[in-house]
Image: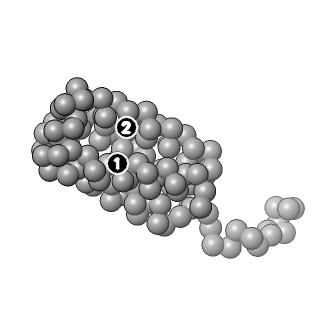
Amino acid sequence: MNLSRLLKIITGGIEAFLGIPFLGGAIILASAWGPLQFMFVFHLITLIICIVQKERFTGSVLGLITSIVGYLPVIGMIMHIVTALVLFFDAARGSKKRKNEHVIDVRKGY
């Protein structure tokens, strides 16, 4: 398992936890929206690592958006749940590399 998949699973788990009705909102409010700021930075780090490793980064971009609009009570909860699902699916799907990546293309010369 590469680093980007591991980070997607971790961020997906935290997003799922923050999406729990009332509990996630209570933690966010009690922490003065600190978890949203932390998750924005965490999603940004995951996004950069996904780009460097040429992995799917849809969930990380959605996570950044969720961290911005997460302060809205009901919309934030829905966004956290959707983001968690997208991150888990991204991690499960693996890389976006082609299936025949191991085949050498003689036209390119390598």
Task: Indicate the quadrant containing the N terminus: top left, top right, bottom left or bottom right.
Answer: bottom right
Q: Quick check: 47 above or below 68?
A: below
Q: Is residue 31 left or right of residue 95?
A: left
Please name the residue shown 47% across and 66% down the image.
Answer: 92
Residue 99 point in image, percent of width and height: 63, 72
* Classed neighbour count for the residue bearing mark 2: other residues with Cα under 10 Å, few (<14), some (14–19), many (≥20): some
Which callout, 1 or 2, points to the residue nearer the camera?
Answer: 1
| SS class, disc 2 | helix
Q: Is residue 2 left or right of residue 25?
A: right
Whole-Å distance between the Cαs marked 1 and 2?
8 Å
| SS class, disc 1 | helix
Residue 32 point in image, percent of width and height: 22, 26
* Quadrant position of residue 55: bottom right
Q: Is residue 43 left or right of residue 71?
A: right
Q: Is residue 2 left or right of residue 19?
A: right
Q: Quick check: 55 above or below 64?
A: below
Please name the residue shown 29% across and 53% down the image.
Answer: 16
Task: Indicate the quadrant containing the C terminus: top left, top right, bottom left or bottom right.
Answer: bottom right
Q: Disc 1 vs disc 2: Cβ atoms closer than 8 Å?
A: yes
Q: Which residue is mark 1?
A: 14
Residue 38 point in image, percent of width and height: 38, 33
Q: Amino acid at mark 2?
A: Met
- Labelled disc at residue 39: 2
N-terminal of the pair, mark 1 or mark 2, is 1
Tell me which colouring the rendered structure shows. Answer: one colour
